[in-house]
Amino acid sequence: MGMNSFVNSVDLLHRALDVQSLRYQVCANNIANSGVPNYKRQSVNFESELKKAFESRDNEHNSFKMITTDSRHVQSEQPRDWRDVEPRRVTDYATTAKANGNNVDAEQEAMNIVQVQMQYQLLSQLESFEFNQLTTSMKSIR
């Protein structure tokens, strides 16, 4: 395991932990507003954008590149750096709402919170494992 892959793994795990924290806040906010008329539930979009960034990087060597000689020319799409992907709060206007215009299902949000907590614990364990791997490999070097 190279140092660069370790840094990338830990960076990605940190980002994922931050996203799970934001998800927890968003779910708790949905529950807090479950009785507020016309409130629309929110969720966090991150993984799909991250996947697109990784795909753009992986497809870079296969993609068609246009040579441009002027800044006004149409530029080829550059691969997206996954480190630039930020979690986005998305408001759900599409699902059918209760009679008061609110579309929060408090029971579903509570289940989402349990799922978020479990994923957070798993990501914390993965991060701990990454550091244990590094410690083990450093001991074997000495």
Image: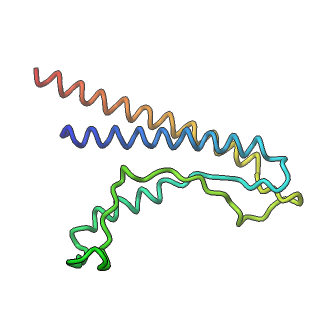
Residue shown at 77%/57% (left/top)? 103
Image position of 99 with respect to 133: above or below: below
Q: Give the image location of residue 42, x and y in percent.
A: 66, 52
Q: Is residue 138 left or right of residue 131?
A: left
- Residue 81 in which image quadrant: bottom left
Q: Quadrant of the N terminus?
A: top left
Q: Residue at x 42, y 53 (%)?
A: 85
Q: Residue furthest right?
A: 99
Instruction: Quarter of the image for the C terminus: give it.
Output: top left
Q: Could you tell me residue 86's position as x and y percent?
A: 47, 51
- Residue 116 location (% of width, % of height): 57, 41
Residue in view at x 59 percent, y 52 percent? 89
Residue nearer the viewer, 57 or 80: 80
Looking at the image, residue 119 lies above or below residue 83: above
What colour scheme governs how the chains and residues are painted in the rendered image of this protein? Answer: rainbow
Seen in the image, is 36 located left or right of residue 117?
right
Q: Is residue 110 left or right of residue 23?
A: right
Figure quadrant of residue 33? top right
Q: How many marks?
A: 0
- 119 or 7, which lies in front? 7
Residue 67 position by quadrant: bottom left
Instruction: Give the answer, above or below, for where 32 lies relative to 68.
Output: above
- Residue 118: % across, % down: 55, 37
At a point 51% along the width and 40% down the height, the residue shown is: 119
